[in-house]
Image: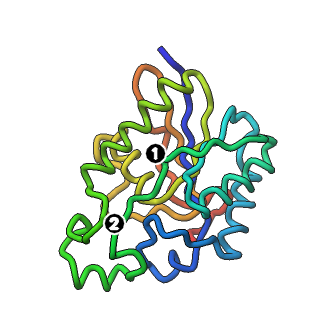
């Protein structure tokens, strides 16, 4: 039986987050508030992480770099399984705009299917279990991918439908024979208010 911990940290805020635009794999940088969110979050993280993994997308990589500097980890491993869900030609559209044009996200040309992201979430958990057994792994990723991982571990109960994962929120999972979610905390780490 392994005794691993996986922390899923969402990157800091971007301007597209404010505008409620589909970001997907478009490389949108964090804004100043996002940088400050991650700086605050990193001060509230304990020092006991063994490794930091990051999505290849810049907003996640920059978040991981800020955290790594704060908690004293010198190297970040880039992990493609942590990529955000691709939204094809919908990237850049507001939620209202894509909702007018398409009935669901799977209908957007070029979008990664729900089934594909669900499989990637399972693959990520298996990857952590087999390659980081017994370790405390902090993984910096994106809202949609984190939602799918949480849903996989909670049998579809977390996050609740319509509930947004805030930027710089941290979600802890533990593997003790199987993956379990420690708790549901959608607000930014180190903040008492939803931003």
Q: Nearer the viewer, residue 92 or 187?
A: 92
| Residue receiving disc 1 | 81
Q: Which quarter of the image is occupied by the C terminus? A: bottom right
Q: Nearer the viewer, residue 149 or 107?
A: 107
Q: Nearer the viewer, residue 29 or 165?
A: 29
Mark with earlier residue (1, 2): 1
Q: Residue at x 46, y 45 (%)?
A: 81
Residue 4, quarter of picture: top right
Name the residue: 67% across, 36% down: 51
Check disc 2 and report the residue beneath it: 162
Whether residue 117 is situated above or below residue 46 in the rendered picture: below
Whether 168 is drawn above or below 89: the answer is above
Cα gap from disc 1 to disc 2, whole angstroms = 24 Å
Residue 147's spot in the image, x, y percent? 40, 53
Tell me, what colour scheme is on the image? rainbow
Residue at 69% over, 35% down: 49
- Indicate whether 192 appears above or below 119: below
> Which mark is nearer the camera, 1 or 2?
1
Q: Position of residue 179 (x, y in %)?
A: 42, 31
**Which residue sits at x=46%, y=64%?**
25
Q: How dense is the environment of label 1, judged by Cα within 10 Å: few (below 14), some, or many (20 and up)?
A: many
Q: Position of residue 148 (x, y in %)?
A: 36, 50
Measured along the vertical axis of the image, is residue 179 above or below residue 188? above
Q: Residues within 10 Å of mark 2 (few under 14, many from 20)?
A: few
């Amino acid at each position: 039986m392994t005794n691993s911990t996986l922390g899923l940290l969402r990157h800091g805020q971007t301007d597209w987050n404010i505008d409620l635009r589909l970001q997907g794999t478009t490389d949108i940088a964090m804004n100043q508030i996002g940088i400050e969110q991650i700086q605050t979050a990193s001060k509230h993280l304990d020092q006991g992480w063994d490794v930091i993994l990051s999505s290849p997308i810049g907003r996640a990589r920059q978040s991981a770099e800020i955290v790594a500097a704060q908690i004293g980890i010198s190297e970040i491993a880039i992990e493609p399984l942590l990529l955000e869900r691709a939204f094809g030609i919908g990237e850049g559209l507001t939620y209202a705009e894509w909702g007018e044009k398409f009935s669901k996200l799977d209908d957007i040309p070029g979008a990664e299917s729900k089934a594909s992201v669900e499989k990637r979430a399972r693959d990520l958990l298996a990857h952590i279990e087999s390659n980081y057994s017994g370790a405390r792994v902090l993984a910096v990723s994106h809202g949609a991918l984190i939602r799918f991982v949480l849903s996989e571990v909670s049998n579809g109960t977390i996050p609740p439908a319509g509930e947004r994962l805030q930027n710089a929120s941290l979600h802890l999972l533990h593997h003790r024979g199987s993956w379990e979610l420690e708790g549901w905390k959608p607000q930014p780490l180190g903040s008492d208010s939803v931003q």
